[in-house]
Image: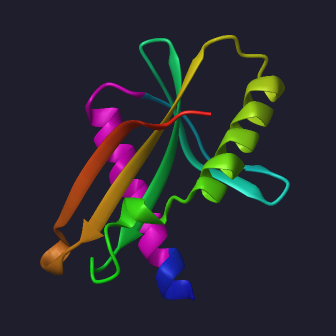
Amino acid sequence: MSGNIDTGKKGEAIAREYLTGIGYEFLADGYRFQHLEIDLIFEYENTLVIVEVKTRNTTVFGAPYEAVTRQKQKQLIRAANQYILQHDLDKEVRFDIISIVLKNEGSHELEHITDAFVP
């Protein structure tokens, strides 16, 4: 299991660097509410961006983003609502998915899906 955790953390670091590099303002990572977790939270153009990062070493079982099921979406929405309440925010919210496939020699493929789903 620690291999999956390491892969996930590596993907989150790649995603954070990518989003920061294109002008997103980092707010938080690993935000937890009860048993729910938001991988990354950013602000971009006065919009709160909730980011789910999915990282895989292979696409044999499909693209990483395909693992964001409707159930996972509901969990992210619930956690995001709590974050908004806790921080007393009044702004638009968007849900993005960063899909990463790790390759040999430290390279990777990254796909950024903006507005991946709506509540």
Look at the image and tell me in which quarter the N terminus lies. bottom right
* Image-based side of 23 in relation to 8, left or right: left
Residue shown at 47%/68% (left/top)? 8
Q: Residue furthest front?
A: 70
Give the answer, above or below, for where 92 lies relative to 76. above
Pinpoint residue 27: horizontal percent, then vertical percent: 56, 32
Which stretch appears magenta? Answer: 6-24
Residue 62 sits in quarter: bottom left
Residue 5: x, y in percent? Answer: 53, 76
- The colour style of the image is rainbow
User: Of 17 and 49, which appears nearest the observer?
Assistant: 49
Any part of residue 31 in sight: no
Q: Which image quadrant is residue 118 in?
A: top right
**19 part of magenta stretch:** yes
Does the magenta run of residues contain 114?
no
Side of 63 relative to 38 (left or right)? left
Image height of 1 relative to 10, above or below: below
Position of the C terminus by quadrant = top right
Q: Main secondary structure of the magenta part?
A: helix
Evaluate whether residue 73 shows in this view. yes
**In the rendering, at what x and y percent does residue 85 appear?**
81, 25
Q: Please give the name of the residue rendered at 42% of the width and 74% of the height, measured from the top-left corner.
A: 7
Q: Position of residue 78 (x, y in %)?
A: 75, 42
Query: As drawn, is 81 to the left or to the right of 38?
Result: right
Residue at 15 percent of width and 80 percent of height: 104
